[in-house]
């Protein structure tokens, strides 16, 4: 466990915790972005450049902006006057603790944990591209089709709205 | 002769050698850290100086185009104006609106400047002169670039002013729209080079046939890609004619209206640094990075070529700013989605065909036609639909 890992993990956890705890919705999204960036930095630290940079591009560059816009356009910027903790925080705590316990047990009982990690593979972007274009090309195409359908759907909804306005 | 060649080579590597020499005095454990700090400091100093030079050059150039002198009071030809401006912005009162969201208001310029400087990490500004050679360098560049939108939003939202909010909305809408053609225009180079590493992209272009270099801009798809990339880059850096987010006559200074003193200067800095970085990426991808334009000029140090190209692009930016009027919001969006996007997609196809056709003049003919004809048809078609007419102003008659 290196120092950089500790810093990044703290940053990620702090960001995610702030995203749940802060009162102002826009602050929450900004804190969430810090969390996303922390996760991306963890990927980079593990040597997964493509995944890490894509995480920044998609989550920090697109998802955060989208969320911020959605909040700004639908929600008043005033903080909501509700207590930060839900009345059922105890139940939530139990669920969270049990999920954590299951994950920790699964990782702990894994062979890789006891026998030590296998040597880190050198995965270049080139190999990822090759895999996507040869082995996983069908999956990639299906994803593309799905996203295109979503895009067309969004355009259709937006167009209908425009006609109503006229 | 060999002596001269060796001298040229040493001059080319002078900064790398100097860094090695400095580091050799340090214990081995500290060397990686100090090497990184040294390179980062060099990048910050060099590009901040270039920023100061550019503000002076821009004001002089615009002044020349508008029949006035430009700055001419501080130093010879007003050259010390940037220093005076710096001192002024440092000594000015830092006003934060009472209603502003103080933490976010403070963090926005910090994030903007940090993100724009981070772009330089993957730009090869000379032979062996790159901070990190990531094998996903181009992806890193665009990922960091997308962080700037968040800084713009933070500035606009936290100021609690209608001008800043409108400016931020315009800026983000524009940056998101033009990021698509920006990335798609650069993909042609990645397809051809087969690599996302900026260093290997430049190395591929730094070879010569006869005296001519193998820059990607000297191919039909490369030329189209370069033009599209530069148009998108102009919009990305909010420069005229795409300066709607900060159009002075419309929304004061856009998203940074409520900033004063040094924070305003930081926004200014961030914007210019971002512009240099995008221009540097255009040089890396299309104009051969640090490589010389002719094979007999390779003795000139590589970093000289990089900065010469950068200054040339900056001059074009200034020239365009002094020449073109600002677009309207709908024109801006139409240009991005109706012209730029189809052209970049078509350019991808052209690059693919170029790759699979045998080298020769037939390849040139087919690919040039594929770029030029749709460009003319598309622009004519869009123009036809818009029904442009000569505008006559009521009072000018």
Image (tube, helix red, strand yellow):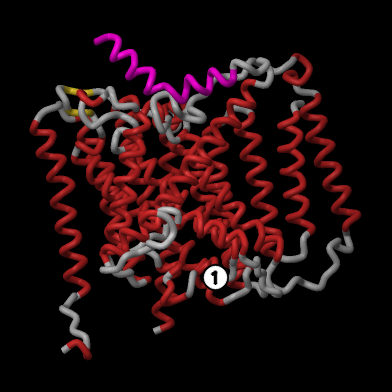
Using the image as rendered, state which of residue B100 and residue B227 is in the foreground. Answer: B100
Q: Quadrant of the N terminus of chain B?
A: top left
What residue is rendered at 25% in x and 42% in y?
Answer: B349
The image quadrant that residue B303 belongs to is: top left
Q: Is residue B225 above or below residue B65?
A: above
Residue B307, position in %: x, y?
A: 36, 38
Q: Is residue B236 visible?
A: no
Image-based side of A4 in relation to B67, left or right: right
Q: Which residues are magenta?
A: B1-23
Residue B107, position in %: x, y?
A: 65, 56
User: Is B195 contained in the magenta span?
Assistant: no
Image-based side of B289 in relation to B102, left or right: left
Main secondary structure along the magenta-highlighted residues: helix
Image-based side of B87 in relation to B389, left or right: right
What residue is rendered at 59% in x and 15% in y?
Answer: B24
Using the image as rendered, state which of residue A65 and residue B329 is in the foreground. Answer: B329
């Amino acid at each position: 466990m290196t120092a950089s890992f500790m810093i990044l993990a703290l940053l990620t956890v702090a960001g995610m915790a702030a995203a749940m705890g802060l009162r102002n919705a826009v602050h929450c999204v900004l804190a969430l972005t810090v969390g996303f960036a922390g996760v991306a930095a963890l990927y980079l630290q593990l040597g997964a450049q493509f995944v890490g940079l894509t995480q920044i591009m998609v989550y920090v560059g697109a998802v955060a902006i989208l969320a911020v816009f959605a909040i700004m356009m639908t929600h008043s910027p005033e903080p909501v006057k509700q207590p930060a903790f839900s009345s059922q925080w105890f139940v939530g705590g139990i669920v969270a603790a049990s999920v954590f316990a299951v994950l920790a047990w699964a990782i702990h009982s894994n062979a890789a944990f006891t026998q030590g990690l296998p040597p880190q593979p050198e995965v270049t972007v080139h190999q990822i591209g090759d895999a996507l274009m040869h082995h996983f090309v069908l999956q990639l195409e299906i994803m593309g089709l799905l996203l295109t359908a979503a895009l067309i759907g969004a355009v259709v909804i937006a167009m209908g709205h425009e006609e109503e306005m006229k | 002769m060999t002596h001269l060649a060796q001298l040229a080579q040493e001059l080319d590597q002078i900064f790398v050698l100097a860094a090695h020499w400095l580091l050799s005095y340090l214990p081995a454990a500290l060397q990686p850290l100090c090497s990184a700090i040294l390179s980062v400091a060099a990048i910050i100093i060099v590009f901040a100086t270039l920023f100061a030079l550019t503000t002076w050059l821009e004001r002089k150039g615009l002044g020349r185009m508008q029949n006035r002198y430009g700055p001419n009071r501080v130093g010879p030809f007003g050259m010390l104006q940037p220093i005076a401006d710096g001192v002024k912005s440092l000594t000015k009162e830092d006003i934060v609106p009472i209603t502003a969201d103080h933490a976010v208001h403070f963090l926005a310029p910090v994030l903007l400047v940090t993100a724009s400087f981070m772009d330089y990490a993957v730009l090869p500004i000379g032979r062996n002169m790159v901070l990190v050679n990531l094998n996903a360098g181009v992806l890193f560049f665009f990922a960091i670039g997308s962080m700037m939108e968040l800084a713009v939003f933070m500035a606009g939202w936290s100021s609690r002013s209608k001008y800043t909010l409108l400016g931020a909305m315009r800026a983000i809408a524009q940056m998101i729209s033009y990021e698509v053609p920006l990335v798609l225009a650069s993909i042609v180079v990645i397809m051809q080079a087969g690599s996302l590493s900026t260093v290997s992209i430049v190395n591929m272009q730094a070879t010569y046939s006869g005296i001519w270099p193998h820059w990607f801009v000297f191919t039909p798809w490369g030329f189209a890609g370069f033009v599209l990339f530069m148009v998108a880059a102009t919009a990305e850096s909010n420069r005229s004619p795409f300066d709607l987010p900060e159009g002075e006559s419309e929304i004061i200074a856009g998203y940074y209206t409520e900033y004063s003193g040094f924070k305003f200067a930081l926004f200014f800095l961030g914007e210019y640094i971002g512009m240099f970085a995008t221009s540097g990426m255009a040089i890396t991808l299309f104009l051969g990075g640090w490589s010389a334009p002719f094979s007999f000029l390779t003795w000139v140090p590589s970093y000289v070529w990089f900065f010469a190209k950068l200054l040339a692009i900056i001059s074009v930016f200034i020239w365009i700013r002094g020449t073109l009027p600002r677009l309207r919001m709908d024109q801006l969006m139409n240009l991005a989605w109706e012209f730029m996007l189809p052209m970049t997609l078509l350019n991808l196809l052209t690059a693919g065909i170029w790759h699979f056709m045998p080298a020769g003049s037939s390849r040139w003919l087919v690919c040039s036609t594929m770029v030029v004809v749709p460009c003319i048809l598309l622009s004519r078609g869009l123009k036809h639909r818009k029904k442009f007419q000569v505008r006559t102003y009521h009072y000018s008659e």
